[in-house]
Structures are given as C-alpha cells and as structure tokens.
Amino acid sequence: MRTLGVNMAWFFDQWVYRSGFPVLQIAYSTSANDVELVVEQMQEITATQGYFRMPVTVQVHYTDGNYTEQQTWMDGKQTTISIPRTASSDIAFVLFDPGTQILSKVQFDKPFAELRLQAFNAPLMIDRYDAVAAMREMPLDIKRTDLQNLYDREAFYGIRQEIIAQLANDTDKKSLQLLQRALKDEDTRIRRQVVASLDTLPKKLEKDLTVLLEDNNYQTVETALRQLTKLAPEKTDTWLKYADGQMGANKNIRIAYLELSLMQKMNKAAAAELTSYCSNLYEFRTRQNAMGALSRIPYCDDVVVANMLDAYQSFNRRLVGVARRALQNYLDNEAYAVIVREGIATAIAQGGDAERLQAILE
C-alpha cells in the first residue's frame, strides 16, 4: 500500500490467504435504455472460501465501433449490474472482465452472431480468443466462412491455432487451402497444429504433411511422426525412413522412432538402445521420454526395471513420478509384474530405500 497507494488487502485475503477462486455464471438482457447483467457466484462455499468481493469491469460494444465501460464492485451470491445505453446503434457484444484480469472461471453463453462480432472486433487478444474457442461445439456450416476469413486477419498464433483445430477435418475446398497455407507458415506452432488436429489423412495434404518429418523444429517432427503413423499405419515404414538418423532435443525424435519401430516389430538392438536412454547415463528429460515409450510399447526386462528403479529413487521429483507410473503400469501386466517384484527385491538387497521401494507395490 505504501508503494502503490492502493489498498489491496481484499485481494490478498481472498486469493492468497484463502483457497479457491470465483466460478461465475453470467447472463444479460437489454432494453431501450440499459443493459443488465446478472452475475452469479457458483463456487462451493467452505470454511475458508466464501463469496468473493471484487471490482469488475463490463464493456458494452456497439455495431458502430463505440463502446461504454462501467466498473462496479460485486459481492454475495448474485450481483446485478446495469449499464446505460449511450449509443443509438445496435449492441454488438458484451464483455465481462475484458482482458481476463480476474483469476476466475467464467461461463458466459452467447449466440454465434455475438461471438462472431467479438472475434472480429474485440480490442484485446484474449477476448477474441475466448470468442473463437466458444465456437468449438457449433456446427461447421454456420462458422466456416467466418473462421476462414478471421484466420487471414488474425496475427496472434493462439487464435490461428484454434481456427485450425476447428477446420482441420473440414472437407471444404477453402478450408483445405487454408490448411495447406498453414503447413507452410513460418511459425512452427501453426504448422504443428495442423498435423496434431487431423482425424484422417487428406490426400491433398499428404505431400505437405510429409515435409514436416524434416521440419527445423524437433517437436514438430516428433508430432508429425506419431500422428502420421496413427493416421496411416500402413505407411509406417515410409514415415520411419524420414525420421531414421534424427535425434532431436533430449532425443525426442530418436525415442519416438524406436518406440514406433518396436511397435511394428521387435528388434533387440532397438530395444537395448531405448532401454539405455532411461538409464542414469542421460539427463532426466531423455529418461522421462524413454520410460514413457517403454511403458507404451510395452517392453520390459530386468535392465528396464533396474533403470526405472534408479530413476524412482532420484532426488528429481519429475523423474520419480514418471518412473513410478511406468512401474505401476508394468505391475498391472501379469507378464511383467514378476520382473518388477524381483527388481525391487534386488534393489533393496543392494542397499536401496526399502520403505520407498515397497511403496511401489501398494
């Protein structure tokens, strides 16, 4: 308070010293003279979490480009906010907490016509994103053209990713052309979103998608390899040829290559290489990737278990969690459960933490 000249005790008391956040349900109605919002707090009321008291901002945007803004304090289960209409033109859209300044969860259902205007005209990126994200469950026929047009207008990658996700499985000619352009976008996040969003492999996109297997971004290569193998498993050998020899960051591409190869056909050399990547010869991210791959195949032997038990006893909690989940997955498999139990007994005999190791079996 001495620095800012603003008393923020209400904020620290509710969001920092207590638990939870407000869950808000909002609806509004209009008349000739005003716009009335009803804000209802829906969060569970407990001994430490009550109804939040906070200042909120509401904006009413009009079709002529103007808007009115009003800030008020909300308190209690339900708050009604009335904003006078100051423009003669129609209301385009209403924003509650523009810019998402409040840490909260908000449900504010709007018709497509309003979401469309918000997506094109809201001044702040997050409000445009919210409008596009709210269209996810709406039929393609009513949103297709607007999403296609918005993609070319929007600069923020997150909104463009959301548009791609909603149009990825559309068979419309313009949507396919948009996806082809997106696969050549300079932003790797856009290129990666295309392949990650597909449910089928369109013939018109196959050539451009194949190029992603030699992308300059390691994560994009891995995503493309896994997704193309899933969409066209009959071409797995073709996809794997592109990835053979690539290592990636923390060996992510190589590990994906080995995992998919072993799912196709067991190979002792490939299994041994993948097993080595979860040993303490490598840093923790490589070990995490390798343990996840071995668990998914699934492949297990005494060396795999020994490496995972070593990871489980690490001081690195992120490594411990992955190792524990992988070992417990093996315990659910009768063929591997014996190997895990024997590995735990051996680790204890060699001086491992008996209590901690036994906890895996619980």
Image (cartoon, rainbow, N blue to C red):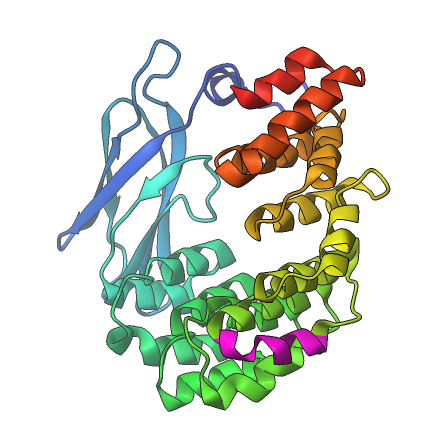
Residue furthest to the left in view is: 31
Residue 55, picture quadrant: top left
Q: Position of residue 359 (x, y in %)?
A: 58, 18
Q: Is residue 360 magenta?
A: no
* Region of the chain picked out in magenta, as a range: 232-242
Q: Is residue 4 left or right of residue 150?
A: right
Quarter-of-image position of residue 328: top right
Tell me where residue 228 appears, x and y as whole percent: 54, 73
- At 51% from the left and 14% from the top, the residue drawn is 17
**Side of 198 where 58 appears, left or right:** left
- Examine the residues drawn in magenta and state their main secondary structure: helix
Quarter of the rendering occupied by the N terminus: top right
Residue shown at 39% from the left, 59% from the top: 133
Residue 36: tell me if it is visible.
no
Q: Is residue 122 above or below residue 225?
A: above
In the image, what residue occupies the spot 63% across and 51% down? 293
Q: Is residue 353 above or below residue 22?
A: above
